Amino acid sequence: MNINHLIRLVLNASKGINNIDEGAIGFSNYGFLFRQVSLIADRFGLEYTSGLSPVGSRRELIEDWDNDNIQKKVTYLCYRSNKVKDLYYAGALKTLLPSVEFGGNDKFFEVGMLIKTPNSKIFPATFYWGSKGLSIGGWKQEIFSHFVMLEKSNTYIGFAPLELTDDELDGLVETIQHTLQTVHVSDFEGDYWTEFGGTTMGIRSGKPFIMEIPIDNDPSFAIVHYKGEFWEILHSSINSKDKIIFKERMSNMAEVNPEKSSKLVNEFNKYLIEKCYNLLIDHVHKKCSRFAFQAIGHFLIENGGKITSDLKKSILENSRWRDERYRFKDITSKIERKKFLYNFRAEILCY
């Protein structure tokens, strides 16, 4: 599919000549064409992208807050945005681009767009669901490898979306939302994982849903998650005296020898582990999870903490391959997990 064909589709859409089968739709003199992000990038010789603006519920919430609280807003909205409403936009996207896949780590989906504005600017962009919610992004390159001048018009490709003014960006985002609201919503679903956990979400029989995925459904994520909880326990135990001593030593050490300063950090972590050892072990037992025991084993080895004979026994009992062999459907994951557990157990036994 050549560039001229893509341009014709988006130009026609901006004139009200939609082509749903081709993923082209317009609204209020804007035209939007949705394609796989790799196709758009390849056709226009593009490489890396940057976030332009949130879309949907997260953007609406931001507009309701005062500008003085921007940082607080971003932190809050990363966790609390109204995902249910945004799933309708994703369902409309599924109608326009049936090949889009949902699910993954950090990004729930990402597609490419070709956009035509009322003032005849045409440029590629991305439409995605990332850690900050539903968003649009643009390529950072100011000069594309392809410039296409359309005969008998001022329309051109070569405009970088990062050059949009605030008013133009507001108009673009609002129009994307209105445009997708005119499209039939298709069913879809996928598993989405971030550092805060996993969810299965999508639309079934026209209705959006979000279900939390138990942490232990993904062994790798569970181990990372529990190790994060261990660090929280250590950091919460640091008192003012610890902070003063550590800062003074770090300040003096870093000026003399950066390598020794790194060693000091490791020693401080070992001190915290020893100080909180019973709290850590109690925390593991309260989780009633085999992966919590695997996580504490990793955590203590990585940071030089002690592993008592009783704890070693518990870790080994909770890291047997026979207890996990039926968790995995595909052969590759099964082989990788089996290898991981055997290597982990050997490391625990030798520690």
Image (cartoon, rainbow, N blue to C red):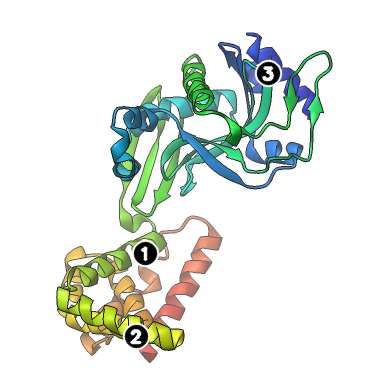
Number of other residues with Cα within 10 Å of mark 3, as a class: few under 14, some 14 to 19, many 20 or more: some
SS label for mark 2: helix
Residue at the outermost top position:
16
Please tell me which residue lies in front, 213 or 136. 136
Q: CA distance from mark 2 to mark 1?
A: 33 Å
Q: Are marks 3 and 2 in contact (CB under 8 Å)?
A: no
SS label for mark 3: loop
Q: CA distance from mark 3 to mark 2?
A: 60 Å
Seen at 17% across and 72% down, the residue is: 237
Query: On the image, numbered disc 2 is attached to which residue?
Result: 252
Residue 101 is at least partly visible in this image:
no
Q: Eyeballing the image, is 98 above or below 217?
A: above
Question: The disc labelled 2 sits on which kind of residue?
Answer: Asn
Of the image marks 2 and 1, the number of the one nearer the N terminus: 1
Say left or right for 217 vs 279.
Answer: right
Seen at 47% across and 71% down, the residue is: 338
Q: Position of residue 217 (x, y in %)?
A: 36, 55
SS label for mark 1: helix
Query: On the image, numbered disc 3 is attached to which residue?
Result: 120
- Of the residues tagged 3 and 2, which is closer to the observer? 2
Q: Quadrant of residue 145?
A: top right
Residue 110 is at least partly visible in this image:
yes
Question: The disc labelled 3 sits on which kind of residue?
Answer: Ser
Q: Position of residue 202 (x, y in %)?
A: 41, 33
Seen at 68% across and 31% down, the residue is: 159
Q: Quadrant of residue 238?
A: bottom left
Seen at 44% across and 88% down, the residue is: 257
Residue at the outermost right position:
151
Please tell me which residue lies in front, 10 or 325. 10
Query: On the image, numbered disc 1 is attached to which residue?
Result: 224
Please tell me which residue lies in front, 231 or 262. 262
- Of the residues tagged 2 and 1, which is closer to the observer? 2
